[in-house]
Image (cartoon, rainbow, N blue to C red):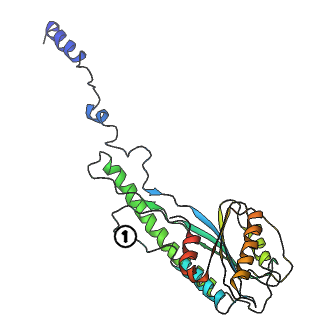
Amino acid sequence: MTIKKLVPLVLALLVLPSGCSMINPSASANPHRQGSTPAYQATVAAPTLDDGVCIDPTTSTPGPFAANVQQIVANTLATWAGPVPPNTLDTATKPRPGVTMVVRQVETNSYLSSNVAVNLSVPSVPGLMAPPPVTSDAFLADDPIWLKGRSAVVAAATAAQSSGTLAAQSVTSMQLESWQNSDIVGCVSALASTMPAGTRRLLLASDLQQNEPPQIAGSLSGTEVLVVQPCNTDASTCTGWADLWQSLLTKAGAASVHFVRPEDAPQDIPSFLRGPQ
């Protein structure tokens, strides 16, 4: 081929149509085709709650009240994590919060460090996003990430269920000391002094009859309080004790104080300890 014939061919190769590239034009047309979507996440983190429980089994408390509360708390922990999803899960799931919990009981001097305190925990379970659609340009890259996330959720749920069972057993095996006198304030003070600061929940199950010098310490700032109060006397007396404790807990900084009767405890205690769902 002569030089004169080569010139038009070279010029035609140099003057390419707008938007074309000598380097695999299809690769730049869709930047996600060969890689995952930016910051793709398959799971959603779940929080861990901080709960404290004071159970009053002392001499003034009516009959089986303390044992009933103990069993309700144990049942709440046993079912805390919920069911373990199947390995074939193909839908989104909500995150399930974990919990750290301290269970103490009212005694003659409830603030003593030597008193029985059961420390428990159930780990959180992350939520799972819906699987990436097969029509997504990034499906081939995102799907392995989602499958890995699903395995992580199933493993976390299995661990949480096991921890909940062990925590429930620890609460059930806690010996209630019914022969003690009632330093109820000391039990609340011990939790207020040792639980992590911030948003937290405290369950006080007691007739609220303080018959020992109160051991006052700590702050209830940021603490939501649920009081389950049995009444073993007349309504006026029990209401008076409730009003006194409403004032005491509020002055200690409690964010909220709510009173319920033992008849409502099987429903109200689990929902309180779990927090908003």
Residue 131: give x, y in percent of width and height.
Answer: 34, 57
Q: Which residue is mark 1?
A: 87
Q: Residues within 10 Å of mark 1 (few under 14, many from 20)?
A: few
Residue under the point 71% across and 61% down: 197
State the SS at label 1: loop
Q: Quadrant of residue 15?
A: top left
Is residue 9 shown above or below 110?
above
- Nearest to the observer: residue 119 or residue 151: 119
Left or right: residue 143 versus residue 66 is: left
Q: Position of residue 59 (x, y in %)?
A: 76, 91
Foreground of the two, 55 or 195: 55
User: Residue 68: image x %, image y %?
Assistant: 60, 87
- The image quarter containing residue 241 is bottom right
The answer to whether residue 165 of the structure is visible from this angle is no
Q: Name the residue located 74 percent from the left edge and 61 percent from the top edge.
A: 253
Front-most of 164 and 108? 108
Figure quadrant of the N terminus: top left
In this rendering, is residue 94 above or below 208?
Answer: above
Height in image: 276 above or below 15? below
Residue type at tag 1: Asn
Give whichever of 123, 244 is nearer the camera.
244
- Image spot of residue 58 (x, y percent): 75, 88
